[in-house]
Image (spheres, rainbow, N blue to C red):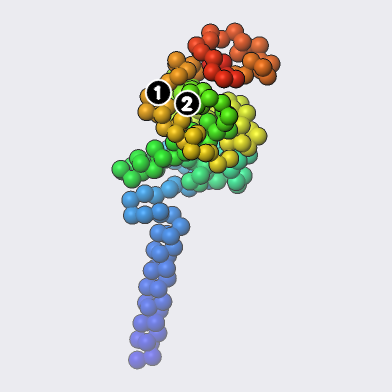
């Protein structure tokens, strides 16, 4: 009898442990029943790691092989990307870091698509606010349009996050202004650009002629000047 009680107690304890493990998994690794966030870190091997390496190499943060192995070079590149883009520098490609890179869960559904779209509008409005607050409204829409025109161009990353966070692309990313809360005007400008209004006339660059010291940018063909910004191709 005593032995049977011990056996039952052991089985009961194991069931409790398994139940707690299941609950912990759902709390820490799932946001709901349909969407899961991967967590790539040192030692990981996956296609997601390949995506991370590909994007970081394209943007100048990583110079190793695209092998899907999260080694020391990938770790260093992720930390470099995080430090330059206002993220927690822990070397772990968690949800916020992946979002900044434009990498989302493969378990796509309508909710995930909507979430990604909202993230794009929010990030684009932050860029508009940081780069062009105080400019005429059409100029703010034009700044957003430049980002979207770069997404369409084969010369730039193919996501809004990728374009904005590309190394050296926008000074407001480096100085942290990208993290300011955008106002309603910037949000509306970002949405208008996404909806198809392009006051920049297809521009993929813009600069302030009063402050720019970059000789190369002055050589670009101008499409339009709005406020303090000159837009060009």
> What mark, if any, has residue 141 been given in the picture?
2
Task: Examine the rendering and report whether any part of residue 55 can be seen.
Answer: no
Query: In this view, which residue lies farthest toward the left?
Result: 110
Look at mark 1 in the image and give the residue it sits on.
197
Question: Is 184 placed above or below 65 here?
Answer: below
Q: Quadrant of residue 5?
A: bottom left
The number of numbered discs placed on residues in the rendered structure image is 2
User: Could you tell me residue 42's position as x and y percent?
Assistant: 55, 45
Residue positioned 61% across, 32% down in the render: 172
Question: Is 11 placed above or below 173 here?
Answer: below
- Depth check, front residue: 47 or 186: 186
Residue positioned 51% across, 23% down in the render: 139
User: Could you tell me residue 81's position as x and y percent?
Assistant: 59, 36
Q: Quadrant of residue 116?
A: top left
Image quadrant occupied by the N terminus: bottom left
Residue positioned 68% across, 19% down in the render: 211
Task: Examine the rendering and report whether any part of residue 113 can be seen.
Answer: yes
User: Could you tell me residue 167's position as x and y percent?
Assistant: 59, 28
Q: Secondary structure at mark 1?
A: loop
Sequence order check: which comes first, mark 2 or mark 1? 2
Proximity of marks 2 and 1: CB atoms separated by less than 8 Å:
yes
Query: Horizontal placement of 208 versus 6: left or right?
Result: right
- Depth check, front residue: 124 or 38: 124
Q: Residues within 10 Å of mark 1 (few under 14, many from 20)?
A: some
Question: Is 54 placed above or below 116 here?
Answer: above
- Label 2 and label 1: CA atoms lie apart by 8 Å
Question: Is 86 placed above or below 167 here?
Answer: below
> What mark, if any, has residue 110 been given in the picture?
none
Q: Residues within 10 Å of mark 2 (few under 14, many from 20)?
A: many
User: Could you tell me residue 189's position as x and y percent?
Assistant: 46, 30
Residue positioned 36% across, 82% down in the render: 8
């Amino acid at each position: 009898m005593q032995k049977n009680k011990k056996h039952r107690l052991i089985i009961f304890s194991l069931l409790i442990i398994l139940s707690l493990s299941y609950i912990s998994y759902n709390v820490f690794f799932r946001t709901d029943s349909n969407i899961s966030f991967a967590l790539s870190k040192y030692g990981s091997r996956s296609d997601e790691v390949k995506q991370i390496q590909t994007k970081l190499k394209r943007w100048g943060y990583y110079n190793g092989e695209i092998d899907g192995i999260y080694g020391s070079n990938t770790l260093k590149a992720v930390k470099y990307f995080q430090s330059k883009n206002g993220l927690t520098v822990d070397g772990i490609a968690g949800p916020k870091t992946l979002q900044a890179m434009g990498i989302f869960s493969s378990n796509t559904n309508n909710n995930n698509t909507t979430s990604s779209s909202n993230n794009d509008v929010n990030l684009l409005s932050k860029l508009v606010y940081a780069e062009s607050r105080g400019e005429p409204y059409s100029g703010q829409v034009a700044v957003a349009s430049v980002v979207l025109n770069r997404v369409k161009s084969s010369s730039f990353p193919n996501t809004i996050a990728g374009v904005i966070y590309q190394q050296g692309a926008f000074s407001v990313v480096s100085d942290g202004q990208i993290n300011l809360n955008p106002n309603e005007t910037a949000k509306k400008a970002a949405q208008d650009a996404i909806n198809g209004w392009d006051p920049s006339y297809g521009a993929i660059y813009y600069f302030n002629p009063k402050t720019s010291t970059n000789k190369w940018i002055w050589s670009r063909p101008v499409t339009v000047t709005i406020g303090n910004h000159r837009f060009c191709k």
